[in-house]
Image (cartoon, helix red, strand yellow):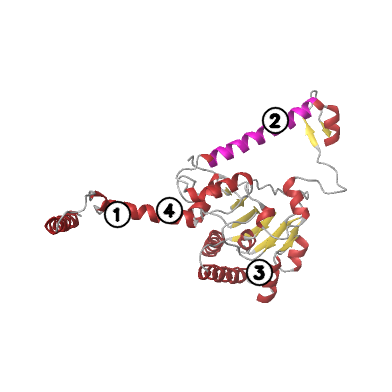
Amino acid sequence: MAKNVGKFWNIATNKETKKADISIYGAITKWAWSELGEVSSQAFLKELNNLKDVDTIHLNLNCPGGDVYEAHAMSNSFRRFASENNIKTICNIDGAAFSAASYLAMSCSEIRMGIGSTMMIHNAKGSSRGESKDLRETADLLDKIKESIIDVYMTKTNKSREEIAEMMDKTTWMNPEEALENGFIDKIETYSNEEPATNFSDFDIVNFYDNVPQEIIDKMKGVQPENTVKPELNIKPQKKGGKIMKYEQFKNEHPELFNQIVQEGMETGVKNERARIQNLDNLKNVPDGAREIVNNAKYVEFKNAGEVALEIMNSDVYKATKEINKREEDFTNSGGAKIPESTPPENKEELDEEILNAATQSFTNGINQ
């Protein structure tokens, strides 16, 4: 499997201003294996500790959420680093701060939201298989995770545990005004053009979260809100002197170029989708019982190979297959597979001799191990 070298964060520094920007534009993952890329909280902490001569860090978020423990690890390590080095921290919610990203934002001393951005808080989610006791254990774990998340929110807002818990139960989506009113942020920034980036191609917001507002769905699909003009396109002129065209004007005056752009976009989309399917088909050592996970990722949930590999490794099918293979290997290594088949003995003397030979062979194998 090709190594995924992409990260969901980027760290940039300015030596003159002693400022650093940490931008998290993507889902928070825990892929730390060499075949999937090093994008875990451990790799994040390593880069964070390399920051020198910095007095202010801006944490810029456009994140749909992700792994709860990875977000907690990043949040706590970020708080500790800032405290130990006397660094001022400012969170800028540029587009989305959903789920785990919302409490990652709480790690900063000041939180700002741009116009058009959204914060979402909800209960922790998980899946489980097995007996009733297994399901109860999972439910108890999710309740504990919820309490730990409430602890984080209470470091910022003055709301009670009960009020925050009720907001999480309902899956609460907040625009900047609502987040400010509820005490989750400190300031609303007005520099936004009300079109924050919220394109998470590998993250199914609608099917993963509850009560998703239609305006969020429209942003994900790139749908223009009603009573708004389409974005202006700055077309490179043939002659000197620039000319700014609106969407419809460009489409009508340059139909051939417009169609070419659309065609190239469609071809790129088809190419990317084929690559996604091919990467899923190239997954190795997939247990037969986990093929349903792969097929579901192809045609229903539209997940990428990295997400599917993680889901398979956490599945009961994978764990059971791994345990069966281990037992078969242990059996083979113990010499059990080396005992030859034989016909039943014809009399008591032959039976006694065969039992003696088998016992001797077993004892010898035990010594050789």
Callout 1: helix, strand or loop?
A: helix
Callout 3: helix, strand or loop?
A: loop
First in sequence, mark 4 or 2: give its number: 2
- Kind of residue sitting beneath label 3: Lys
Q: Is residue 47 visible?
A: no
- Kind of residue sitting beneath label 1: Phe
The answer to if 258 sits in the magenta stretch is: yes
Give percent across and percent down for residue 233: 79, 36
Q: Residues within 10 Å of mark 2 (few under 14, many from 20)?
A: few
Q: Are marks 4 and 2 in contact (CB under 8 Å)?
A: no
- Kind of residue sitting beneath label 4: Thr
Q: Nearer the viewer's eye, disc 4 or disc 2?
A: 4
Give percent across and percent down for residue 231: 80, 41
| Residue stretch in magenta | 256-280
Between the C-alphas of marks 1 and 4, the distance is: 15 Å
Q: Which residue is mark 1?
A: 331
Q: Are marks 1 and 2 in contact (CB under 8 Å)?
A: no
